[in-house]
Amino acid sequence: MNSFSLTFKAGRGALDTIRRHGFDISSVGTIAGASGGAKWLVLSQLDRAILGSVVPKLSGPVHLIGSSIGSWRFACYAQADPLAAIERFEAAYLEQTYSSKPDIHEITAKSREIMDIVLGDNGVAEILSNPLFRMHVMAVRSRHVMASENRFLLSIALLTAALLNAASRSTLGWSFERALFYDERDVPPFFEVGGFPLQRVPLSAGNLADAVVATGSIPLVLSGVRDIAGARPGVYRDGGVIDYHLDLPHSAQERFTLFPHFYGRIVPGWFDKKLTWRRPQAGNVDRTILVSPSDEFVARLPYGKIPDRTDFVNYSPTERVRVWRQCVAACEELADEFLEVLEKDQLAARLKPLW
């Protein structure tokens, strides 16, 4: 039995179309990027493969929709030299160091520092004028007590939200408002996304960096971003709270969404991670192609796991960097297999249903 490094899954519409007619890569109209912090390192080689071999074959406009770290990756994708931007991001992310007991202010400052490295001098202008990509950022605006930076109050509010979410995902709307920062040159497929209060804010030179930092601002870990230009006054936080793996309409009806992901499962919201019965709406992912590391591949990584935020606590800084570098190097295997599947037209044979 073959042991593959990647798994390929698809929504029903994408599965049927590709099995009947094959896969035309120029039909990709959206690329999705999930929340997940350090887990993104397992995708950095795959990102390079997509940028080097897939992107030149795409027909625009192509929408980039990300929350949290997904938006940070796409801030690289949409620059004039995306491979150089990915290199800067990866290097800065790998090498980030902190004091022995960093507080929220130190971690927030480091986040800003890495964002400045990623964007460089011209990144914002390049993103907003990219001829192919339309970058969109999903964050949340905190409501009521969720806007507090008091650790005790915010902890109680988050615990309450998690308990209510277990009963009904819609209750998150009491605590958070979706904030879609969008490239107004083209309306994305998710512009009218429902289910929660929604604020739409055009991306601009004055708010792009803040929007990307905000969607990576994990409650209790980083401070929220206050009063983003062009948006309603308030505190903006990690978009993964509602859109952990982006349960929203990914694709126009005639196009596909490419979703490179760390997991073979799409989890709707941050509080749904342990709610195994909760799935995205089938219509939202109908045209989605999910590409993720296989369990067999993950088992071969250092310590048999994908990098994550707990590594900052469980490893010394030197050990963490060493393990993360080993993981990034090992993931060249994912990029090679992905390109081979496309070049040999094997996608239809490898695809499985999302569930």
Image (spheres, grey):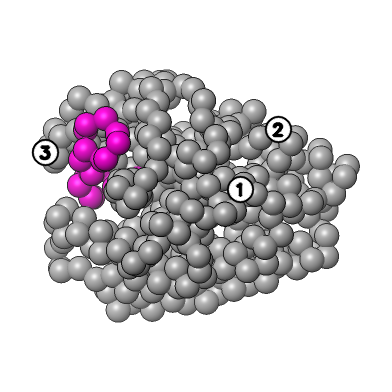
Whether tag 2 and tag 3 are in contact, CB under 8 A, the answer is: no
Q: Which residue is mark 3?
A: 150
Residue 265: numbered disc: none
x then y, percent, for residue 22:
85, 49
Quadrant location of the C terminus in the rendered image: top right
Q: Residue at x 23, y 50 (%)?
A: 221
Task: Name the N-terminal-most of marks 2 and 3.
Answer: 3
Q: Which residue is mark 1?
A: 62
Q: Secondary structure at mark 2?
A: loop
Q: Is residue 207 left or right of residue 244?
A: left
The image quarter containing residue 161 is top left
How far apart are the alpha carbons under marks 2 and 3? 45 Å
Residue 253: numbered disc: 2
Task: Name the N-terminal-most of marks 2 and 1.
Answer: 1
Amino acid type shown at disc 3: Asn
Question: In this rendering, is residue 113 above or below 144?
Answer: below
Quadrant location of the N terminus in the rendered image: bottom right
* Mark whose residue sits in front, 2 or 1: 1
Judge whether residue 232 is colored magenta.
yes
Q: Residue at x 46, y 55 (%)?
A: 127
Task: Name the N-terminal-most of marks 1 and 3.
Answer: 1
Q: Magenta segment, which residues?
A: 215-234
Amino acid type shown at disc 1: Val
Q: Residue at x 81, y 38 (%)?
A: 16
Dominant secondary structure, magenta = loop
Q: Secondary structure at mark 3?
A: loop
Q: Residues within 10 Å of mark 2 (few under 14, many from 20)?
A: few
